[in-house]
Amino acid sequence: MHLTVLGFQSPYPGPLGATPGYLLQTEGTNLLLDCGSGVLSQLARHLPVYELDALLLSHYHHDHIADVGVLQYGLMVHQIFGQRAKDRPLPIYAPAEPAGKTESLVYREATRFYPVEEESRLTIGDVQISFLRTDHGDGDPCYAMRLDAAGKSIVYGADSGPGTDWSRFASEVDLFICEATYLERTKPAQPNGHLSVKQAAATAEKLGCRSLLLTHLFHEYREEEVRAEAGEYRHGICHVAKIGLQIEV
């Protein structure tokens, strides 16, 4: 599996930046995981939007879905241009709740909505996908995704607080994409559905993940300070998210 970071910043993109979005590619499948602000402009550097096989959304917070509307417009235009068949709408897999958010995921012939829950199991091309509800704090579901293909495994942790039980879902995965929203100097006194860099590193080390990608970072954080707080992870390679970063799993 080949992963490209299209966006990783939160709560909003910094200069020339983008909020969460990741392109996952295998021999025959192109998946977009989340679609935040600025993600489509980065996707165009690697893959035409009309070659996507599916979009998977972890939850409906704006930093993870801001580009969905323009993705739909883009697909509609490519159908008009004849570059994508009108009988091939892009499937969007996303939480079934809240219902008010799901209505906009169907747009003309461009996109179709398919609800997912924690028990859902998908096969898209050569990728098997399962889901885990995370501790994201505000009542609406947020789902981490485990993607398995050709004997390799990636877990995209989406947004998650310290109450998430990763033990059976992410143990010894080849790549754990884990949010690291806070540095120690910015971490709030009470947990609020997000992890710090230090917590993310400790979680990946405990799980025995073979590699770690720290993401969901505020755009003003410096890479060296992120790495300094990730020292507890020693099991494998630790990547700090950058736009355009590519990881082969």
Image (tube, rainbow, N blue to C red):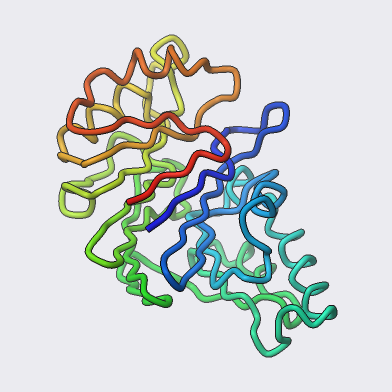
Give the camera-side residue of 44 and 213: 44
Between 73 and 161, the residue placed more toward the observer is 73
- Is 9 positioned to the left or the right of 146 in the image? right
**Residue visible at 42% across and 77% down in the picture:** 125
Image quadrant where residue 152 sits: bottom left
Residue at 38% across, 37% down: 213
Q: Where's residue 63, x and y in %?
A: 61, 42
Q: Looking at the picture, how far across and down is residue 24, in whole percent? A: 46, 58
Q: Is residue 112 above or below residue 183?
A: below
List x then y, in percent, for residue 183: 42, 17
Please name whichever residue, 136 or 25, is drawn nearer the observer in this view of the structure: 25
Answer above or below: position of 4 versus 203: below
Toward the top, the furthest residue is: 185
Q: Quadrant of the N terminus?
A: bottom left
**Quarter-of-image position of residue 10:** top right
Seen in the image, is 50 located left or right of residue 214? Answer: right
Q: Position of residue 97 (x, y in %)?
A: 51, 64
Residue visible at 33% across and 15% down in the picture: 229
- Residue 195 drawn above or below residue 163: above
Relative to 50, 132 lies left or right:
left
Total label count? 0
Q: Is residue 188 above or below residue 15?
A: above
> On the picture, is 47 further left or further right than 196?
right
Q: Residue at x 42, y 75 (%)?
A: 124
